[in-house]
Image (cartoon, grey):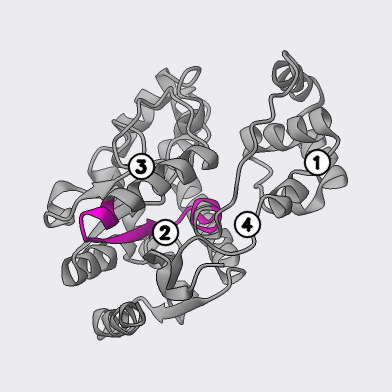
């Protein structure tokens, strides 16, 4: 078993959407000679900038950012892909004498990577995924989600009912192997975590502050061209499978189809984003070792830097 100090240190800045993770991650990277690894399932894609609140060149302040703008939107990218890529990046960043700083709100990515989850290559029988998709079209997504709840309640609890891709993936695994996806994940954990990590979580003491920030950010996104970006996703929805399911784009599909007013779609996006933030908080609150900081504290950076300095001194 490796000694604690032999492990590569990794700093992580996580939390729900609109809490200022990007800015804090950049500030800490500047202070401690770090490079950022984005732990966001959508920022990996090129051309999806506004709806994903992708970090801008100005916001990076010269800090290298990885796992951003790597793939075209029609390319699939899974948690297994992320953990493999992030693992290589940590080695490369560390070899340069820099600190890996994981920044993002995709809890599954952060948890799987820091826990060293090993993803087995289990190929499902040919045609099973297509058969399940056809079955969903006939039975409806609610019935398929109910089946997943009965077969694997733990996996179902971690998947939103509207995330049809992940619902089908979990059902595919169960039908192909007879094993729960949640059990496979439990079995895939190594005896010890591969990295020494400091987890900094951002939140607000008053939840209404977070919700107001989310609503204001949606308004800014609309001003900066979100509708045009969402239209591009809508026009390519058959090939941009992941983006077509993503919050920030799918809410506008009824408007493009002539079925809803733009104002109601914007309101729906705000509501969807608030609900997503709540799910993110639930996920991160179940992670061990999280140190929570108030995102609107005037001395936020000083608090975070003090914790990071103490963490790095333990090397």
Q: Viewer-nearest of labels 3 and 4?
A: 4
- Find residue 148 and name its label: 1
The answer to whether 306 appears left or right of 275 in the picture is left
Q: Are marks 1 and 2 in contact (CB under 8 Å)?
A: no
Q: Regarding mark 3 in the picture, which secondary structure is present there? A: loop
- Magenta residues, start to end: 93-112
Disc 3 target residue:
43
Disc 4 target residue:
190
Q: Regarding mark 2 in the picture, which secondary structure is present there? A: loop
Gap in angstroms between the C-alphas marked 1 and 2:
27 Å
Q: Position of residue 128 (x, y in %)?
A: 75, 19
Q: 59 or 93, which lies in front? A: 93
| Label 4: few (<14), some (14–19) or many (≥20) C-alpha neighbours in 10 Å | few
- Find residue 17 and name its label: 2
Gap in angstroms between the C-alphas marked 1 and 3:
28 Å
Gap in angstroms between the C-alphas marked 2 and 3:
13 Å
Q: Are marks 3 and 4 in contact (CB under 8 Å)?
A: no
Q: Viewer-nearest of labels 2 and 4?
A: 4
Q: Earlier in the sequence, mark 1 or mark 2?
A: 2
Q: 215 or 87, which lies in front? A: 87
């Amino acid at each position: 078993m490796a000694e604690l100090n032999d492990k590569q240190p990794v700093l992580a800045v996580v939390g729900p959407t609109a809490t200022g993770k990007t800015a804090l991650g950049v500030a800490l990277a500047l202070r401690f000679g770090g490079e950022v690894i984005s732990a966001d399932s959508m920022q990996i894609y090129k051309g999806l900038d506004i709806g994903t609140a992708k970090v801008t060149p100005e916001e990076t302040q010269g800090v290298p950012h990885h796992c951003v703008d790597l793939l075209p939107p029609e390319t699939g990218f899974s948690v297994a892909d992320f953990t493999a890529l992030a693992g290589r990046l940590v080695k490369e960043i560390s070899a340069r004498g820099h600190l890996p700083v994981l920044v993002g709100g995709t809890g599954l990515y952060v948890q799987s990577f820091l826990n060293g989850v090993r993803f087995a290559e289990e190929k499902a029988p040919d045609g099973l995924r297509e058969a399940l998709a056809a079955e969903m079209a006939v039975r409806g997504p609610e019935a398929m989600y109910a089946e997943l709840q009965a077969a694997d309640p733990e996996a179902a609890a971690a998947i939103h009912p509207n995330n049809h891709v992940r619902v089908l993936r979990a059902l595919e695994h169960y039908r192909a192997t007879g094993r729960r996806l949640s059990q496979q994940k439990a079995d895939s954990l190594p005896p010890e975590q591969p990295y020494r990590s400091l987890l900094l979580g951002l939140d607000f003491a008053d939840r209404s502050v977070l919700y107001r920030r989310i609503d204001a950010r949606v308004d800014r996104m609309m001003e900066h061209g979100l509708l045009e970006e969402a239209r591009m996703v809508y026009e390519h929805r058959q090939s941009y499978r992941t983006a077509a399911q993503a919050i920030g784009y799918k809410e506008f599909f009824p408007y493009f189809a002539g079925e809803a007013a733009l104002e109601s779609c914007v309101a729906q996006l705000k509501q969807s984003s608030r609900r997503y933030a709540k799910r993110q908080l639930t996920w991160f609150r179940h992670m061990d070792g999280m140190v929570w900081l108030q995102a609107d504290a005037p001395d936020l950076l000083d608090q975070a830097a003090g914790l990071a300095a103490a963490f790095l001194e333990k090397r």
